[in-house]
Image (cartoon, grey):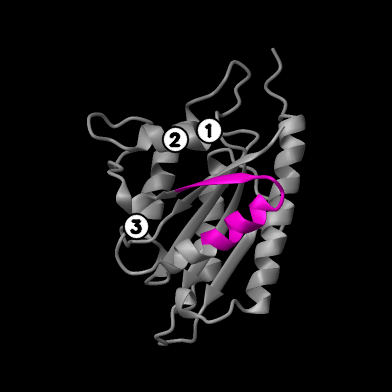
C-alpha cells in the first residue's frame, strides 16, 4: 500500500507574503518522498486558527481537528520549523501541545493513536540552534507516540548575524541535499516496516 505523509510548516509567515525558507526545505523533502511514491499534504500552520490547549478539539472555530485527522490518516509526519531566538517557532510549539492529547487517546490495547507513524524534522534559520530545535521537537514527538528514524533531520543555518535566508540561496548546498536524501530514505523505510507490522499492545 502507498504511504502518505503530512508536513506541518511552522513558519510565522502566512501564505501570500514573503517566501518561507521552511516551505522551501519542506518542498525538497516532499519532492524526495515523491520519488518513493509518497504523496505529501502540507499545512502552513500560520494560515489556520489553531486554538491554544491540550485537547484534540478546543471548540468552535478550532482548526486543529482537521489537521489532526490528516496526521492520523498519514504514515509519516514531517515537522518543519524556523529558528527564532534559538528555539522552535511558537506555532510549531502549539501544534506539539495539541498532540499532547494523544497521551490519553489509546486503543483497546493501550497504544496511542499516533503509534505506527514515523516522524522527521526540518529546521532552517540564520543562527545556531538547529540541534536545539530538533532536540525539542523530537523529544515531544517521541513523548506522544511517534517513531523517530535514524538521521531523520535536515537543516540549514546561515552565518551568525547574517542576512541570507535559505530560500534566497541560488543552489542548495550538497550537505543539505545529502541530509534531505537520508531523511527521506530512512523515514520511508521505517514507515513501510511499521505499516507492515504495528507495535504490540498491552497483553490482556
Quarter in which the C terminus is drawn:
top right
Of the two numbered discs 2 and 3 on the same chain, state the one appearing first in sequence: 2
Instruction: Specify whether residue 3 is in view.
Output: yes
Does residue 122 show up?
no
- Examine the structure image and report whether residue 36 is included in the region drawn in magenta: yes
Residue 133 locus on image (x, y percent)? 49, 63
Q: Is residue 165 above or below residue 111?
A: below
* Mark pair 2, 1: CA separation: 6 Å
Residue ID at (51%, 37%): 71
Residue tagged by mark 1?
A: 72
Q: Is residue 2 above or below residue 158?
A: above
Q: Is residue 83 magenta?
A: no
Secondary structure under badge 1? helix
Answer whether labels 2 and 1 touch (C-beta < 8 Å): yes
Q: In which quadrant will I find the N terminus?
A: top right
Percent x, y of residue 63: 32, 37
Q: Quadrant of residue 171?
A: bottom right
- The 10 Å Cα crowd at callout 1, few under 14, some 14 to 19, many 20 or more, is some
* The magenta segment: 26-42
Which residue is tagged 3?
A: 90
Decide if residue 59 is on the left or right side of residue 36. left
Relative to the observer, which residue lies in front, 85 or 176? 176
Mark 2: few, some, or many residues within 10 Å (few <14, many ≥20)? Answer: some
Residue 47 in the image, given as x and y percentages of width and height: 31, 50
Q: CA distance from mark 2 to mark 3?
A: 18 Å
Instruction: Identify which residue is drawn at 65% across, 49% down.
Output: 148
Instruction: Tell whether label 3 touches label 2 (CB within 8 Å).
Output: no
Q: Which residue is mark 2?
A: 68
Of callouts 1 and 3, which one flags the residue occurring earlier in the amino acid sequence?
1
Discs 1, 3 touching: Cβ within 8 Å? no
Residue placed farthest to the left in the image? 60
- Of 58 and 18, nearer the camera is 18
Amino acid at each position: 500500500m502507498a504511504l502518505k505523509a503530512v508536513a506541518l510548516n511552522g513558519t510565522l509567515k502566512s501564505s501570500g507574503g514573503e517566501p518561507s525558507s521552511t516551505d522551501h526545505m519542506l518542498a525538497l523533502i516532499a519532492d524526495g518522498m515523491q520519488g518513493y511514491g509518497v504523496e505529501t499534504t502540507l499545512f502552513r500552520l500560520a494560515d489556520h486558527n489553531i486554538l491554544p490547549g491540550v485537547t484534540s478539539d478546543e471548540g468552535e472555530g478550532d482548526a486543529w481537528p482537521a489537521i489532526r485527522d490528516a496526521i492520523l490518516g498519514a504514515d509519516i509526519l514531517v515537522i518543519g520549523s524556523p529558528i527564532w531566538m534559538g528555539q522552535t517557532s511558537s506555532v510549531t510549539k502549539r501544534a506539539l501541545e495539541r498532540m499532547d492529547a494523544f497521551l490519553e487517546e489509546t486503543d483497546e490495547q493501550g497504544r496511542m493513536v499516533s503509534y505506527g507513524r514515523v516522524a522527521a524534522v526540518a529546521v532552517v534559520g540564520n543562527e545556531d540552534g538547529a540541534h536545539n530545535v530538533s532536540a525539542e521537537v523530537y523529544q515531544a514527538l517521541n513523548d506522544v507516540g511517534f517513531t523517530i528514524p535514524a538521521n531523520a533531520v535536515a537543516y540549514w543555518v546561515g552565518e551568525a548575524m547574517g542576512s541570507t535566508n535559505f530560500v534566497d540561496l541560488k543552489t542548495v548546498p550538497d550537505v543539505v541535499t545529502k541530509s534531505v536524501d537520508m531523511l527521506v530514505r530512512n523515514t520511508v523505510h521505517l514507515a513501510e516496516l511499521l505499516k507492515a507490522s504495528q507495535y504490540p499492545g498491552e497483553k490482556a
